Amino acid sequence: MKRIILVVSGMFLISSFMSCADQNAHYIDLESGKHITVVKDSTKGVMVNKETNEPVGIYVDTDTKDTIYGKTGEVINNHVIKTEDGKYTYEVHANPDNSNIQESEDYKKKVEKDGDVKIKEGDTKIKIDAENGEKKVKKD
């Protein structure tokens, strides 16, 4: 009887360890709800699921509790909406005049129709290509 308990206990420990191994990846794909390992695709510059090599749209970093846009790597907390068909999308908040430009005294952000993002903060300009995630930083 003791052998059976030890074997069952050992099997329980092994199965518990295996189920936790998936959770070592501290990112969750928002679409699937599954723990994933995220890596940057060196050719496209976007974040992809390491197992499937498929681009990741929106994912959550469970360590920092940040929501991240996979194409640009930008933290998009409070800018994610769930559509009627159950999909998640990145919502860009617009100015009251319905333009796609956000600005203040030292900050300006513009999201173009193709998804490219241009940010000017002080004397720093940042351009993010939506297609490949490439980020260019220029200081005046």
Image (cartoon, rainbow, N blue to C red):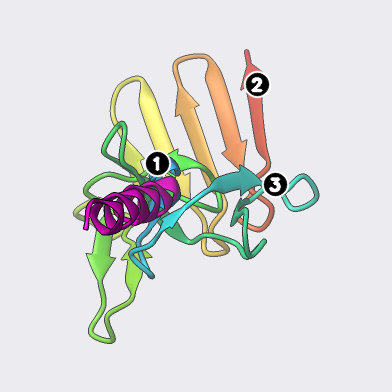
What residue does disc 1 label?
Answer: 26
What amino acid is found at the position of numbered circle 2 in the picture?
Answer: Lys
Question: For the stretch drawn in magenta, what is the main secondary structure?
Answer: helix
Q: Which residue occupies the foreground of this view, 110 or 11?
A: 11
Q: CA distance from mark 1 to mark 2?
A: 32 Å
Instruction: Identify the magenta region.
Output: 1-21
Q: CA distance from mark 3 to mark 2?
A: 19 Å
The quarter of the image holding the N terminus is: bottom left
Q: CA distance from mark 3 to mark 1?
A: 20 Å
Mark 3 neighbour density, 10 Å: few (under 14) some (14–19) many (20 or more): many
Q: Nearer the viewer, mark 1 or mark 2?
A: 1
For the residue labelled by badge 1, is the local secondary structure a helix, a strand or a loop? loop
Q: Is residue 76 left or right of residue 114?
A: left
Would residue 10 be counted in the magenta stretch? yes
In the depicted structure, whether residue 29 falls above or below residue 86:
above
Residue 138's mark? 2
| Of the image marks 3 and 2, the number of the one nearer the N terminus | 3
| Residue 127 visible in the displayed image | yes
The quarter of the image holding the C terminus is: top right
| Residue 100 visible in the displayed image | no
| Of the image marks 1 and 2, the number of the one nearer the N terminus | 1
For the residue labelled by badge 3, is the local secondary structure a helix, a strand or a loop? loop
In the rendered image, residue 60, in percent from the top left (x then y), is placed at: 35, 48
Q: Is residue 60 left or right of residue 45?
A: left
At x 24%, y 65%, the residue is 81
Count of marks overlaid on the render = 3
Residue 45's mark? 3
Q: Nearer the viewer, mark 3 or mark 1?
A: 1
| Of the image marks 3 and 1, the number of the one nearer the N terminus | 1
Mark 1 neighbour density, 10 Å: few (under 14) some (14–19) many (20 or more): some
Would residue 79 be counted in the magenta stretch? no
